Image (cartoon, rainbow, N blue to C red):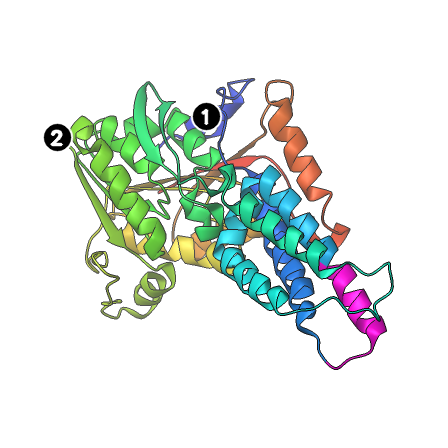
Amino acid sequence: RPPAASVRGVFRRRRHMPALEDGFADEADNYEAIVASERVASWLLDVSSLALAGVPVSRITLARRKALRALQALQTNVESSSAYAEEARIQDVSDRMTRALVELSKCEEDANLPASAPTTSELTDAVSAVITALAGPGAAPPRTRTVSVAGTSVVVEEGALAEGLGARLWRAALLLCESSLFRPMIKNANVLELGAGVGLSGICAARLEASRVVLTDCEASVLEILDRNCDANRDACLPCSLEVAYLQWSDDAATESTGGNGWEAETPAHPTLKRDEVFDAVIAADFVYDDAHSDLIPAVLARRMKRPGGVGLLLAAVRQEELLEALLRHMSDHKLEAKATRFQLDEHEHPEATARVNEARAMFTPDERAYQGGFVHICVW
């Protein structure tokens, strides 16, 4: 059991947070991905209206104007934002644009359309411009980079945020590794990472002398990235054992509450974490996104932490105060002790990150601005 004073002082003793490397995903990226998903879907709906037939000329004129505006917006945003390029790929925009070209090739210019209506030629050029944009820099494959963290380095491949939140590297993972409690808690320990994503925290634990690390997630695409990242770092982590396993928190939590045998399903090439495995240390970064997580995480911790002697080390962005309060309340429900420490990024040290979050939040109505800001570091035993 860690001394309460040491937990409370993890970040309060440090007036400035560790400098963050460029390119870490944050709330601005999350919000941008949400907005991109909605806007791309809306633009595609406007483009689909080109298929109108047997309707008044006035409606066709309106449909063509909306379609042209949508195509121009799609082109501009795909060229300027990787979030829109990723979302366009997920929503099969390239195939849809190809089909639109086929449909437009069958259209003849209608002499009855007013001069203000976009011509078939203009629409064809706009569709072609979107296809060209999709083949540009935004279509580049996932990147691989070396991240310096906690005095060591980890090779990390990232996917598209549209493939799942875990496909990107989030700031909280770096901050977890930089916690003053991280190294002493994982040294020589059997470690489980929940919601590992690209695996920075778990692989860092392996580099810092954990004896064994099992990295878990539940999305097939993320597990594949996790496999590749473990392979890329495996030799550097020796003699620590690195393993990847499938874990669905709801199934694990249900087993903990009912005393059942657990979930036995497997995803391709990824065995489910064994139902009877417990660990010296359980770590997780950026793990609370909705109400369900506030109850699931404590249940999984109660099931997977070795009793007595096991410890959990968690770090996440504070999105909603209610979620944090519920999380800590449910810790008690599962007979777990927890100490939470809130902290903020220094806006003078990280002005760009702070500005991006504020700008992204401005896209939402007041009722949707749930993000409270800052981070929380939680030690559990």
Packing grade of label 1 (10 A; few <14, some 14-19, many >=20) is some
**What residue is disc 2 on?**
239
Q: Specify start and end residues of the magenta stretch as a single range.
A: 54-67
Q: In the displayed structure, does residue 67 sit left or right of residue 169?
A: right
Relative to 340, residue 109 above or below:
below
Q: Secondary structure at mark 2?
A: loop
Quadrant, the N terminus: top left
Quadrant housing residue 276? bottom left
Question: Going by the image, does 130 lie left or right of 151?
Answer: right
Residue 138 lies, in percent from the top left, at 51, 40
Q: Secondary structure at mark 1?
A: helix
**Residue at the far left in the pictured view:** 239
2 vs 1, front mark: 2
Is 56 in the magenta? yes
The disc at residue 10 is: 1
The quadrant holding residue 63 is bottom right
Whole-percent x and y of residue 128?
59, 51
**Callout 1, which amino acid?**
Val
Task: Tell me which amino acid carries mark 2.
Answer: Pro
Q: Quadrant of residue 207?
A: top left
Q: Position of residue 77 (x, y in %)?
A: 63, 44
Check the picture and name the quadrant holding the C terminus.
top left
Depth check, front residue: 230 or 17? 230
Depth check: give the residue in front, 168 or 348. Answer: 168
Query: Residue 66 location in percent, x, y?
Result: 76, 60
